[in-house]
Amino acid sequence: MAGHSKWANIQHRKGRQDAKRGKIWTKIIREITVAARAGGPDPAANPALRMAWDKATAANMPKDNIQRAVARGSGATDGANYESIRYEGYGVAGAAVIVDCMTDNRTRTVSDVRHALTKNGGNLGTDGSVTFMFKHCGQFIFAPNSDEEKIMEVALEAGAEDIQTDDEGVIEVICEPSDYATVRDAFEAAALKPEVSRVFMKALNEIELEGAEAEKMQKILDTLEDLDDVQEVYTNAVIDID
């Protein structure tokens, strides 16, 4: 079914993110600030900062904005003291949801996340209630008609653990989070540019939603992603975008 096409869903998600670029920049700046505070201002020696910096570059954020966020995080300027926190819950039809946040006020954030879920038919779960349904890993996705042989060769040499090509020709490379930077740099050196490059929570088993259930689930995801304190939202729901 076209709506369940991995490639169509990737493009759909990128389009939604582009429409929210200002909010995306705000979230990335927060991530850069926290990474610089935790691991120092040098992206070469701070993998979390390098990843956040890459996100900023991919989102076309001006370099001055990035450097100001690094300075704020490393103590050169004052700023709020954010902490990372994860919430778990359920959306429509038992679909699992993981919500990663950065906040300076836990009370506000948990209230906002709970409200976003419950008002749209979901509910907030307890710690560990859904994380077992996901695998923490690095992911690279290449567009159809990419050079599969070259991608496989570079990925395996760099330590990737799994490479899959679907019926549309979309190539997915999976690696351990600790190997993400090595695999990313290997692709970069080989002039191979993935459409998606990230460390994330990959669903082990997906739930396909259509019609009214798909609409309700998309509303939950949109509402969560629009919250200022929310950095990333992961789900095992595959939504029919038609």
Image (tube, grey):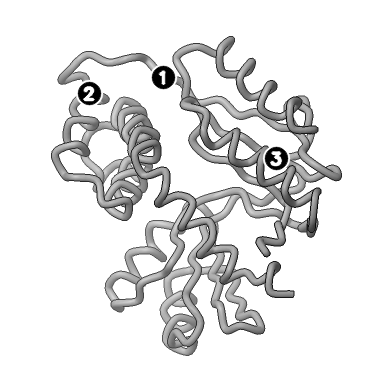
The answer to the question of whether label 2 and label 3 lie on touching residues, with beta carbons closer than 8 A, is no
Mark 2 or mark 3, earlier in chain: 2
- Determine the CA span between mark 2 and mark 1: 12 Å
- What amino acid type is highlighted by mark number 1? Tyr
- Helix, strand or loop at label 2? It is helix
Q: Which residue is mark 1?
A: 82
- What amino acid type is highlighted by mark number 3? Val
- Helix, strand or loop at label 1? It is loop
Q: Nearer the viewer, residue 70 or 216?
A: 216
Q: Is 19 on the left or on the right of 63, as rendered?
A: right
Q: Which residue is mark 3?
A: 97
When the figure is inspected, residue 114 is found, relative to residue 22, above or below; the finding is above
Residue at point 64%, 54% (across, down): 202
Q: Number of callouts in the render?
A: 3
Mark 1 or mark 3, earlier in chain: 1
- Determine the CA span between mark 2 and mark 3: 31 Å
- Determine the CA span between mark 1 and mark 3: 22 Å
Residue at point 31%, 25% (across, down): 37
Q: Is 207 on the left or on the right of 33, as rendered?
A: right
Residue at point 24%, 30% (across, down): 69
- Helix, strand or loop at label 3? It is strand
- What amino acid type is highlighted by mark number 2? Arg
Q: Quadrant of the N terminus?
A: bottom right
Q: Is 210 on the left or on the right of 138, as rendered?
A: right
Q: Residue 49: which quarter of the image?
A: top left
Q: Residue 4: which quarter of the image?
A: bottom right
The answer to the question of whether label 2 and label 1 lie on touching residues, with beta carbons closer than 8 A, is no
Number of the label disc, if any, that sits on residue 72: 2
- Disc 2 vs disc 3: which is toward the camera? 3
Residue 160 at what x, y percent from top left? 51, 69
Residue 122 at what x, y percent from top left? 78, 32
Residue 27 at what x, y percent from top left? 39, 34
